Amino acid sequence: MNNEEFRKHGHELVDWMADYFKEVESYPVLPNVAPGDIIKQIPGVAPEKAEAFETIFSDFKEKILPGMTHWESPNFMAYFPANKSKASVLAEMLMSTMGAQCMLWLTSPAAAELEEQMMNWLRDMLGLPGHFTGCIQDTASTATLCAMLTARERATNYGVNQRGFTGDEKFTVYCSEQIHSSIDKGAKIAGIGLEQVRKIPTDEQYALKADMLRQQIEEDITNGFKPLCVISAIGTTGTTAVDPIAAISDICEEHDIWHHVDAAYAGTVLVLPEMRWMSEGVERADSFVFNPHKWMFTNFDCTAYFVKDPTALVNTFAISLDILKTDVDNEVKNYRDWGIPLGRRFRALKLWFVIREMGVSGIQAKIRSHIAYGQWLKTEIEAHRDFELLAPVILNTLNFRFLADESEETLNELNKQIMDNVNKSGKLFFVQNVLKGQFALRLAFGGTELEKRHVENAWKLIQEETVRVYEQFKQKS
Ligand SMILES: *Cc1c(COP(=O)(O)O)cnc(C)c1O
C-alpha cells in the first residue's frame, strides 16, 4: 500500500467508523452465531499472493462484523462496560501510526513524560493521596499480579527473585469471597498457591468482614504462615460492594502486610467528590488499581496502577542489560522496570486526549448520570411486587430477580429463561450472578452514549419477557 492508497482507505475507514458510532445501537448486541460459524469462513492457510485492500475490508464487513458482540452499544449491560470516546479512538490511531514503543525514556521521551503527568492527573482527579505514583499497565489483572510479586519480594528482602523459592515459604494472601478471579490467578502465578488464598466472609452488604480478616491472619501467623498481601475492593465485580479500606489498612499496618486496593471498575467514580467515602483510608494502602478502560471513556486497554513506594516496585522488576543502558538512566523513569513487559504501548496519549476533550467536568457529568440511572432502576425494582433486589445498589450495577410463589429451584430456572430469551432477542445483553444460591439478573451499564431511555427500555424488555416466561410456565405445569 502506498501513501496515497493509505490516505484513501484511511478516509473510507474513518467514514465507516463514524457510521458505526451512529448505528451501533441498532445492531444486535449479541451476534446470532454458533461456535465455529466464523472460523469456517476464514481460509485455513495464509494467502500466497497479495490481496486488494478493498477485498479485505469487505470481508471484514461481511465475515467479522456479524460475529461481533457490540460492547459500544448502549444496550450492552453485561459484565462491566469497557466504554470509550471518539477522542480515545483517534489517539489510538496516532499511537499506532507512530508505532511508539515506550520501554525506556529514550525510546519515546514524550511518551514517558506524558505517562508520568497523566498518572498525576488521574491521581488528583480521583482524590488519591499526593504521595501515590505509578504507571499505566495493560490490565488490572497484571497490576494485581505486580502487587503480589512486590509484596512477596518486599517480605523476603527481594530474595525469591534472586534465589527462587527455598520450599520453606508459607505465604498467604487475603481477599473477600466476592473478590475478582484475577486474585486467584495472581496467586497461582506468584507462587503463592490457590490453597493459600484466604477468602474472608462478607457481611450483608457483600463487603469483607474486617474482624474475620484479623482472626484469620492471626490464626495463620500462629500456624507458621507468612501473610503477604490483602487485596481489598472498592466495587466488587458482582455487586460493586466496598470493603472497609481503613479497617483493613489498620490490620495490614499492624502485621506489616501489603494492602492492595482493587478498584478496577468503580475507581472512576472517585472523580465525584461526593463518592469519596468509598476510598476512605486509601492513603494508607500500598497500591491501588483502576481501569480507565472500563468506565473512563478510554478504549481498551489502559489500567492505572499506583503505589506508595515505587522503590519496592522497581526493585522487584528492574533488570540490567547492556543493550538497554542509556546515559540518562539516573534522571528519568524507565517504565520497563515498573512492571512485567519490556515493550509498552503509548497509552498515555489516549488519556491525554480523553481528559482534555471531555474535561473533568464532562467526565463527572457522565458518571453522575450513569449512577442516577442505576438509582432510578433500583427504585423501580423496589416498587414492583414481582421483582426483588438481591444486593444493595451502590452505583449502577443491579442484581435482582423475578419473584413468585415458587420453589427456589424453579425461580432460578425461570430467571435464567428470562435472561436467555432477552439476550437472544439481540435488543439487550446482560449476564447472571449467583448470590447466596439465588440466580440474579445482573445489569451494569456505563456506555458512553448511554441515555436514560436505554435503561428504561431494558427494564421494559425484562418485564415483558417475565410475563411471557411465567405464563408459559404456568400453562405447562
Ligand atoms: C474487571 C475487573 C478486574 C479485571 O480487570 P482486567 O483489566 O480485565 O484484568 C479486576 N477486578 C475487578 C474488581 C474488576 O471489576
Image (tube, grey):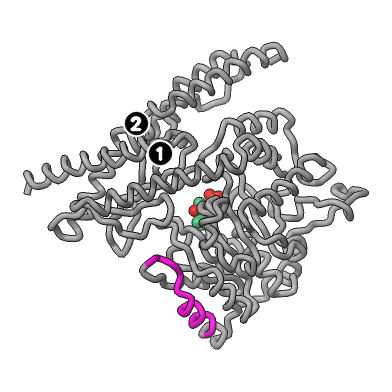
Q: Residue furthest right?
A: 327
Q: Which residues are magenta?
A: 205-218
First reached walking from the N terminus: tag 1 or tag 2: 2
Q: Is residue 121 visible?
A: yes
Q: How many marks?
A: 2
Front label number (1 vs 2): 1
Give whichever of 185, 275 is nearer the camera. Answer: 275
Give whichever of 252, 317 is nearer the camera. Answer: 252
Residue at 72% in and 14% down: 3
CB at mark 1 closer than 8 A to ligand 1?
no
Residue 389 location (% of width, % of height)? 29, 56
Residue at 58% in and 15% down: 12
Q: Is 120 positioned to the left or the right of 405 in the image?
A: right
Residue 369 location (% of width, % of height)? 45, 43
Residue at 71% in and 14% down: 2
Quadrant occupied by the N terminus = top right
What kind of residue is marked 2?
Asn
Q: Is residue 264 visible?
A: no
- Assign the magenta stretch its main secondary structure: helix
Check disc 2 and report the residue beneath it: 32
Residue at 66% in and 69% down: 151
Labels 1 & 2 near each other (Cβ < 8 A): no
Q: Is 319 positioned to the left or the right of 392 in the image?
A: right
When the figure is inspected, residue 180 is found, relative to residue 447, above or below; the finding is below
User: For residue 76, which numbered disc appears in the image?
Assistant: 1
What kind of residue is marked 1?
Phe
Q: Is residue 289 magenta?
A: no
When the figure is inspected, residue 372 is found, relative to residue 9, above or below; the finding is below
Identify the element where label 2 is drawn: loop
When the figure is inspected, residue 174 is found, relative to residue 327, above or below; the finding is below
